[in-house]
Image: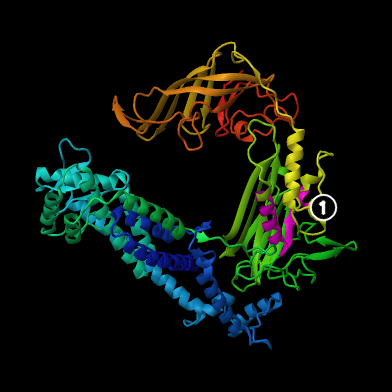
Amino acid sequence: MRGLFLMVLSMSGTASLVILLVLLLRMFLRKAPRVFSYALWAAVLFRLLCPITFESPVGIIPSGMPVLLERRLEVTDRLRVADHLGAPDSSGAANISSDPDTLVVAEQAADTGGITDSLEGRAAQSATSPAGLLAIATAVWLCGATGLLLYSLISLLQLQRRLLGATPLAGERQVWLADHISSPFVLGLFRPRIFLPSNLPKEEREYILFHERTHIRRLDPCLRALAWLAVVIHWFNPLVWLAFYLAGRDMEISCDEAVLRNIGRDIRADYSSTLLRLSTGKRLPIGPLAFGDSRLQSRIKHVLHYKKPALWVINLALITVLAAGTALATDRNAKMAGGSGRTGLDGQSGKPEQSGQLGQDGQNGQHEQNGQSQALRPSTPASPNTGDTPSEKGLPETDVNHNGIPETLRLSETGNELSLDFQENGTKIWSAWGSRAPSEWNALFLCTLDGEDYLLRYRPTMYQGNFSYHYELFFLKDGVETTVQQKSISFDTNFSAPFHGTFDPIAISTFVDELNGLLAHSVQLFNTHADLQAAFDQAGTLAETLWWLDDLDGTFTRDSSKTMSENLQDFQTAMTLTQTPAVPVKTDSLPLSHPVEMEFLSGAGAWRTTLTLNPDGSFAGEYTDSDADVQYICRFHGSFGDFARLTDASWSLTLKELVLDTGHPLGEEWRENGIRYISSGPYGLDGPDGAPLVPGSAFLLYTPEATGYAPGTELYGALQFWTWWPGRRQFIDARDQLGCYGLHNLATGYGFFSPDA
């Protein structure tokens, strides 16, 4: 729980800076529609509620700043623990022994009135220690948050009791009249209802209902609930309360402006009179989850002085809010890896120190084996261990929990599965898992940056010319992974395939350089990835070399005098020349002897798109889905053209026409036979943005004889397509065929299959 409170403190500190910047920006947006000021608070809400940070080139907050407070508190706590254990050494640094025997003596001393608990527990004994103060602060924070939650619940129950006599307003949906309220408000999240005072004149209801329905259309009830949740979590921060107040004010005034802008006539006098009359009544406390503005005087003043802004003001405000929102919600890019100009966690050069990261044998991340220097990795399963004993031979002690207490490592192996346990004072706090099965290869490294221990997880995967590389640098916070830096890249080398994706030599080499910068500071803990380990052994160091560039049988030869980026560019050129694309042969019809029923479905959920494809390329189909009491539906028809045979089992074709026959515009709701319907798009015939495809969109049609066991075959590399199909086959040799018809949407990668041939 202390770790959670530290994370909240860190998020609150970052959000405070964002709040101050939003307050400054609001001053420059005074002449713009208030909805733009309201939109700026989204960045604050994101900072207050989302523990994950994203980086961008325009981010204002420096990368790594959100964990600064946590790290400083940890360091202070560590020094306090050191004071309990011993005096500073000659260098002035506290001497915290990592010898497990010291820990055993400490435990024995408990029986003689000496040290009474673990390292962290002893520091917490003193109410003036950082750990003790942090424990007290955590308890106070929990009490405050619990109190606000109880207040929310009690307020909601009291309000619902006062609304028991409310009656629905005839002719209006989800609108209720209540006798014991003096101003309108919205109540509810998923089915919000509008409550109006019973004595509100009918001629004034038009303005008020438009205002409240604007709230509902914009999902203000949900946003207000999230804002209140942020207040509950960060109740100790006065800037958060100020943000909650001002965001609510901007929300209400922006709805007032929407009323004035959309009614179609000048209603400022009438609307302000309505607000004035509502402000004179007795105010009913409605709580945080049901909201109606009690600050009506400021709204009246704004309504009376409202003028429709010029178009250039709106455009300028829009650009300002988009740019500022991105800058406030993201962190500024910062490289932490060493080498190639990258920096460490403290912003200094990431170049390894000369002393390096010492393993247990005193070598720089390596040990001597059979007279040769080998990358450090366990080669035998661990024997059972109990108590506070040193790490197994060849495995270093670590402090990836960043609490000053060294962890010991225990390796165990059962069959092809391997487990590495991290123990603190004899208790397992975390474990890593790997397997020698190719589909579950995994590699883990101890990475030391700026004197701090981190874990580096790396798992490159490759199948049928599709590559996916991902690394993650993290430490443990109370045994829970806390990511500091991560990156992924995907590409494919099927250059002649119609579905070839991306291959960016510069992006790939940049990824490899960043990874190798981290590996240069690392010691290998375990590695079940056979090809990666072979590459490490061949290179004699921990470095990603893209070993597959050296396994191309004369098609391409790596030039050691060139950079990784240059070699990848040469590889791309060589493979493009070598891989010959299929020559399309135009045909008048598709290879179908009869209409084929095809389907695109989840395999588990309720949604399904069916499509009947005719030999002349015409088709018709229907998409259906259900969610509680809602039915989503889309009926459609259209046609394909430009037929061309690529191989004996694949045809290319393009979309000529796609017509929606649902009878309702996309997104429209209606009721039929007591069922609520929503008009939807033709799922499966849509693009990456979810919109229906336009004429000219490319497709592939596969016959049941299509296979994918080798480069150049129809489905080799089309993983996103055929691996999605619930009835998929594994293409091992020429005998493994698709066994049904397949329609491949090249815009998204997925598509339709016939139940059988």
From where the camera sits, is residue 111 visible?
A: no
Q: Residue furthest top?
A: 593
Find residue 224 and report its horizontal and vertical position in percent.
Answer: 32, 54
Give the residue displayed 53% in from the left and 14% down from the top.
614
Give the residue displayed 19% in from the left and 52% down from the top.
161
Other-residue count near label 1 (Cα within 10 Å), few / some / many at <14 / 14–19 / ≥20: few
Find residue 64 and report its horizontal and vertical position in percent.
Answer: 54, 65
Q: Looking at the figure, which quarter contains the C terminus? A: top right
Closest to the observer, 269 or 226:
269
Q: Is residue 115 above or below residue 144?
A: below
Q: Quadrant location of residue 344?
A: bottom right
Find residue 586 and report its horizontal and vertical position in percent.
Answer: 63, 17
**20 sits to left or right of 687:** left
Q: Is residue 19 above or below residue 412?
A: below
From where the camera sits, is residue 305 visible?
A: yes
Q: Secondary structure at mark 1?
A: loop
Is 532 within the magenta? yes
**156 sits to left or right of 46:** left
Residue span colored magenta: 507-533
Give the residue displayed 50% in from the left and 66% down from the top.
66
Q: Is residue 613 above or below residue 628?
A: above
What residue is pinned by disc 1? 560
**146 sits to left or right of 554:** left
Main SS class of the magenta portion in the image:
helix
The residue under label 1 is which amino acid type?
Ser
Give the residue displayed 73% in from the left and 60% down from the top.
525
Q: Quadrant location of residue 654?
A: top right
Find residue 354 and report its horizontal and vertical position in percent.
Answer: 76, 73
Q: Residue furthest right?
A: 371
